[in-house]
Amino acid sequence: MLLHLLYLLAIIAEAMSGALTGMQRGMDRFGLCLVGTVTALGGGTVRDVLLGHYPLVWVSHPDYMFITIGAASIAAVGARWLRKGEWLFVTVDAIGLIAFTIIGCDVAATLDVSSSIVVLAGAITGVCGGMLRDVLCNQIPLVLRRELYASIALGAGALYVALQACGVAQGPASVIVLTCGFVVRMLAVRFCWQLKVFTAADSGGAG
Amino acid sequence: MLLHLLYLLAIIAEAMSGALTGMQRGMDRFGLCLVGTVTALGGGTVRDVLLGHYPLVWVSHPDYMFITIGAASIAAVGARWLRKGEWLFVTVDAIGLIAFTIIGCDVAATLDVSSSIVVLAGAITGVCGGMLRDVLCNQIPLVLRRELYASIALGAGALYVALQACGVAQGPASVIVLTCGFVVRMLAVRFCWQLKVFTAADSGGAG
Amino acid sequence: MLLHLLYLLAIIAEAMSGALTGMQRGMDRFGLCLVGTVTALGGGTVRDVLLGHYPLVWVSHPDYMFITIGAASIAAVGARWLRKGEWLFVTVDAIGLIAFTIIGCDVAATLDVSSSIVVLAGAITGVCGGMLRDVLCNQIPLVLRRELYASIALGAGALYVALQACGVAQGPASVIVLTCGFVVRMLAVRFCWQLKVFTAADSGGAG
């Protein structure tokens, strides 16, 4: 299934991005693997803990963890080369964001929750991995500061839920959302779209 | 019901305080809404996850989330004015702290746990939202450093449980605890009461 | 039972280490008790939340919390002396790490999960308390940066699971793992063994 393949691609990309961030903070090999794994699997874990949806994905499929650990290790060894392929990363990461979001919506849709929670569960799956990475690396989560990252996850989730509510089947809906979400995300990165950042100056505070 | 009204007031106040903190850290509009929502609903979420009490409040009542998102947005736009009304904030926040604590105790009391856990569940509800806000904003949680904030939550919870153990009904007990807790909290703010801060100097460490 | 005794020793040591870390960050008395308690009981809590294993240990045994609060308070008062006995601490902490890991494996083994998750649950129990302590104190978790701490927890867990798979009873397996794990940990501290730290220089990044 397409979505499963994209999921694997996404956790590999996220694990590598986690490992690269950890390297910039002087973590050891174990730390890199852990941050990589948390980045890749953290979004789904937060979603499942919040929804009380047990067992967690990686508890029933420990092999996903081995994949992320492997990806993080490879990233640590090949960092010099990976940095040159930054655009490849951004691309895979964008696919991953949307794939995670769709998967998150699918999981929540199997439970007895309202549509807005389904959309939110999708966005949490897409975004929370990176947020945990940033907390572990002791920096303000990027997602709270930059680019249309979380907004795109929310938008993609809303579109996915809306399409299904209009009678579009799961398969076509996934393809449509993936395409639209990916294009918007790449445009956002390319043209540095971002939401207005409120600063202390705006608020007249001392900051 | 009084407590429900106070709860709404409290989540609005907390969402605004979260948004104002986020602004000082240069977050974008989405970040502000998220930090505001986490500040307002995080305490109850932590409590319910720790107690295994599903579904979470905001999963079954997504409308609370829309309220906090709205409050955070308003705070972002009106920050200049809100800062001038700081005392209003502190007042509403004090009411919210006690209201959250009472509600947290009520939730835990419906489960099969000991009295000390009921008190703790109340304090967690009152305090953890602000703690999550500070972790997301990359600062040491204020509650760990300043004022009689958490102590008041614990004290209010203990009083509430004790009153009910002595046969006072839930309604009167809530009113008594709200009044006492609010007064003590405002006095603590006014006179800068605080617990002794232990510093590296005390411990002879290098710090 | 030996393991229970070691568990008590371990939570006391961890609570003290949490309190001492909090002191270096200027926390008040409440903050110290909270950080101490989170350090001591956080590992098991993270494990149980991830595995959906309710009620949590400290919910059904609130007395453990009183023990950790007491230990943190004593640490705050006696910090000057405790720092002189640093080696005692490192020793007790090493025992605690292995004891936590064994207990974590035992808990996970009662659930229907694969061996790799049992090992991981052990390591999470041993390591996550310290990680939460560092996040609350706003520093990059030490465990991600230094020494063979987490690796030893993983190794101890793997050895414990392997021994039992080979037919060794729980009691002897515990003793063997405790001894080996303790010795390796003390050697790691003594000779500053550590995993290679990847830095921005390695990766050619600006870092």
Image (cartoon, coloured by chain):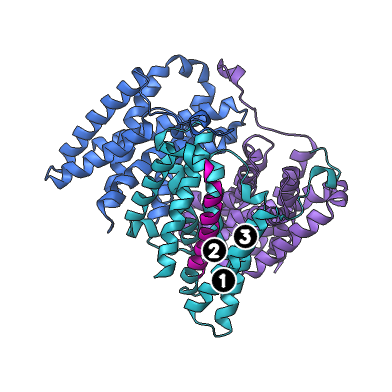
Chain colours: A cyan, B purple, C blue
Q: Residues within 10 Å of mark 3 (few under 14, many from 20)?
A: many
Q: Label 2 to label 3, Cα distance in Å?
A: 9 Å
User: Which type of secondary structure does the marked residue at label 2 adopt?
Assistant: helix
* Residue span colored magenta: A84-105
The amino acid sitting under disc 2 is Ile
Callouts 1 and 3 in the same chain: yes
Q: Position of residue A131 (x, y in %)?
A: 56, 49
Residue A17 visible in image: yes
The amino acid sitting under disc 3 is Arg
Near-viewer residue (B162 or B206): B206
Quadrant location of the C terminus of chain A?
A: top right
User: Which type of secondary structure does the marked residue at label 3 adopt?
Assistant: helix
Looking at the image, residue B36 sits to the left or right of residue A37; the answer is right
Q: Residues within 10 Å of mark 1 (few under 14, many from 20)?
A: many
Q: Label 1 to label 2, Cα distance in Å?
A: 8 Å
Q: Residues within 10 Å of mark 2 (few under 14, many from 20)?
A: many
Taking the view exactly as shown, the residue that stands out farthest to the left is C167
Question: Magenta stretch: dominant SS?
Answer: helix
Does residue A91 belong to the magenta stretch?
Answer: yes
Looking at the image, tell me whether mark 1 or mark 2 is earlier in sequence order: 2
Q: Position of residue A157 (x, y in %)?
A: 58, 69
Q: Residue at x 55, y 85 (%)?
A: A167
